Image: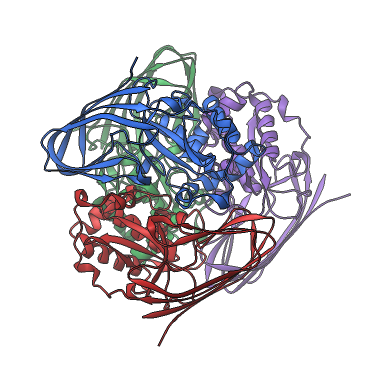
Chain colours: A green, B purple, C red, D blue
Amino acid sequence: MILKLNVKLHYRLSEPMDLLLQIEAADLVDQRVRSTEIWTSDVAHFSRVAADDGIGERIWIRAEGDFSCTYIAEIAVDRPALDISALPQTPLHLLPGETIKHLMPSRYCPSDQFQAFVDAEFGDLAGGARIAAMRDWIESAFSYVPGSSHAQTTALDSFVQRQGVCRDFAHVLVALARASSIPARFASVYAPDVMPQDFHAVAEVYLGGSWHLIDPTGMADADTMARIGVGSDASSVAFLTAFGSMELVNQSVSVIRQA
Amino acid sequence: MILKLNVKLHYRLSEPMDLLLQIEAADLVDQRVRSTEIWTSDVAHFSRVAADDGIGERIWIRAEGDFSCTYIAEIAVDRPALDISALPQTPLHLLPGETIKHLMPSRYCPSDQFQAFVDAEFGDLAGGARIAAMRDWIESAFSYVPGSSHAQTTALDSFVQRQGVCRDFAHVLVALARASSIPARFASVYAPDVMPQDFHAVAEVYLGGSWHLIDPTGMADADTMARIGVGSDASSVAFLTAFGSMELVNQSVSVIRQA
Amino acid sequence: MILKLNVKLHYRLSEPMDLLLQIEAADLVDQRVRSTEIWTSDVAHFSRVAADDGIGERIWIRAEGDFSCTYIAEIAVDRPALDISALPQTPLHLLPGETIKHLMPSRYCPSDQFQAFVDAEFGDLAGGARIAAMRDWIESAFSYVPGSSHAQTTALDSFVQRQGVCRDFAHVLVALARASSIPARFASVYAPDVMPQDFHAVAEVYLGGSWHLIDPTGMADADTMARIGVGSDASSVAFLTAFGSMELVNQSVSVIRQA
Amino acid sequence: MILKLNVKLHYRLSEPMDLLLQIEAADLVDQRVRSTEIWTSDVAHFSRVAADDGIGERIWIRAEGDFSCTYIAEIAVDRPALDISALPQTPLHLLPGETIKHLMPSRYCPSDQFQAFVDAEFGDLAGGARIAAMRDWIESAFSYVPGSSHAQTTALDSFVQRQGVCRDFAHVLVALARASSIPARFASVYAPDVMPQDFHAVAEVYLGGSWHLIDPTGMADADTMARIGVGSDASSVAFLTAFGSMELVNQSVSVIRQA
């Protein structure tokens, strides 16, 4: 499947400042970058650095005044539409070293608090079957309510409030997975079926020896998504981090599935 | 300087379970492992995996019943006693990719909350001078009170309560450094001057192009410490993580500076 | 039913300090005090003040060194064993003024967070039937685990962790009731069937025009309890508040149902 | 001093719902209501109930569709412009019963967390002098930033972030006062010098045997304010609580000091 991406950002910076941009789809074995272009308005500095877990890149920018950026790319996604419920759970003591940090509680996913809940509600399931049940439960029990969460909202808050946006749905699934001894991380993605189109966030779980994208909002299928970057939770995967104050002028995201 | 380490752990496991052990000093350019031995009681599984940020290793163990472990090592620490206050701050847009995750808020270090405080209190200082001032402020304003914090205590709680143990002091410094746009991480270390002797935790900040250990409790000097592992905060660097319930039988840590 | 109470407290105070004692069963229409005596060791000050919501009294004490207190009383509890599920919910706009504060979130019962949950899980029930269903759910879903909570634990924490002690069970029910527009408060009580015997805490809900005791741990029946005091949550109903540091020497609570 | 109040509210209710209105200045010895009128659009129910601590009233309303309300009153404020710093602290054991609940931590004022901070920073002051120093510190260290807080923001958050609006300033002072063993409550008031004019919130502390209004934002003087109501914190003193969702159409507050 080919995804055609077209992203435009336009911000007004209140002073000269550093920006961290993470908007380019990563070039990975299951999602190949066929073409990619990125332009920005005049900036004082532009450099690429590796992003977390070896997936994708971030761009450091130093700019002032009006900052605009256009990103156009074509990504060939070649990822099977897997039935996640059949995937086995890797025993803890066989987990690779790089997955361990994704077993641990993070800023927005305090998974240590969810032990009793997952034992009680999903205790008879393991591995992919448990993840699938947790995803289904979130999808049915939670409401997608734009504006219902804010920068401090954690999976604990969302769990109790039973509402949120994609970041919150992903946080809850990540927290429940980690509380089940299944490594889980947060992924920023492009997905053509998310409406209105925007940057999207999903969970990624480690099952059967590899990572699997999973969208607890039910809006996007794993075989249609292109990862931008991954991290422990939303605190480490923002599409734009401004080290100073700025004002949004305009922003648009277009993700088209090529016929 | 040579450190002689001797650590004994003895736990009673309530059932067969997986354990994650991270107690060995890492072999690094500024701390060379001259000899190292580790024994455990009979276990069903023992394997090493890489730990975070490429520093040290973790050990996966599967065991049941009584679990004991002895670790004996000799570490040659060769790290200058630096005056941290003279080190320059790296401009954000020149920070290497692998330091970026340590700019971000984490479970116990919600640095996003501390922006106004660091601006108000330390706004006229930058880089090493700011870190030194923050360390001095913590050391003077906070009380070291064993038992005053628990597994949920964050840097925010400690900041308000002005008390804690080494993990809490480290969390506060890490949070204040990140709020100052200085990458900071949490380090588990051995240090000979910590009394009573135990596993110790300190902060590590990225200044002048490299990482620097710094102990806001004032108990340990950077040139005497041996790192075990590093991570975003205490959630990712425990000396022992048990995936099940266990009971402490006995535990001792000896860190001796060779004459 | 007659309850015979015998409480002994013995503490060692580190300095001269003020103590607030709230251990006497209140004299109310549904629980008559037939006899009551209270002695303390030598104290510099002893005075009674009214407690919250016009229920019971608190005692201000100024003491130093060893402080001991003995309270012996006989209480005639005359409260019907009501089926709470049949009680109607008072429409909000008919609630008396003094119940309104118990509709609002408090320190340990942030009921504003639980709206979506109660709507989703108990939305088809109202009044006493809803309270009974919430009590039954808590009793079955939560584990009573001594030591599992601490002074900062809120109903939010307990809700996620699904464990706690009597104060935590009561906090969760109070929070769920308030989120259902039913006034609810926290009550400190004596109850003969709580094992091991100790001060006990339950919820009290306003249904059908009056307050009703309800124990979500399932240990105590409403017709066997004697109220000591009530308040918004555990922050306002402690049996002993010390304004200084003290050490427990000995404490015993005996509640006997007279044959 | 005479205050002329003119308040207009206009909301659109999404469904028939109950509203709790608390906008009328209370009639008290230091603020006499000389005239008062309140009109609403057609409502199904309108009844007055007593508000907390015997100060003022709340109004229960049942309405649907467009709800509007006009309140016009004239209040004679006769309260001396006291130098709070000279007022003595009442020893704990002499505090009246009704002030005790205002010593305790509440939803937004978790005063139990601030003990070490007040001891360290204000330990050499007591009573009014301490309150004045805390008010001055808040006024100088905090920034008034509209929009910087939200419904979940506590005094702990504001303390660390050092910014907020009137409710947050009041919460911090209330928390610091309680941590100093001085009863403190939250008061909703009208004040002519607050710009832009709006409902205002301040702290009230119990010193020298009575309650004293104090505004840590520095915008309003005690001798110019008219209390609407008081409570433990913002959770119990809202000018309008809607038990359902509604939309603001228009709202205006005018407080004029008569020449």
Q: How many marks?
A: 0
Look at the picture and state if A252 lies above or below D202: above
The spot of residue C8 in percent (x, y) is 57, 73
Q: Residue furthest right?
A: B259
The spot of residue A245 in percent (x, y) is 44, 21
Look at the picture and state if C48 lies above or below C190: above
Look at the picture and state if A202 lies above or below C199: above
* The N terminus of chain A sits in image quarter: top left
Q: Quadrant of residue D35?
A: top left
Given residues C97 and D122, the one toward you in this image is C97
Look at the picture and state if D29 lies above or below A130: above
The spot of residue B140 in percent (x, y) is 70, 38
**Image point (40%, 36%), residue name:** D187
Q: Can see residue C201? A: yes
Q: Can see residue B53? A: no
**Image point (72%, 40%), residue name:** B29
Given residues D18 and D36, the one toward you in this image is D36
* The C terminus of chain A sits in image quarter: top left
The spot of residue D49 in percent (x, y) is 25, 46
Given residues D162 and A199, the one toward you in this image is D162
In the image, C226: left or right of D34?
right
In the image, B23: left or right of C27?
right
In the image, D30: left or right of B5?
left
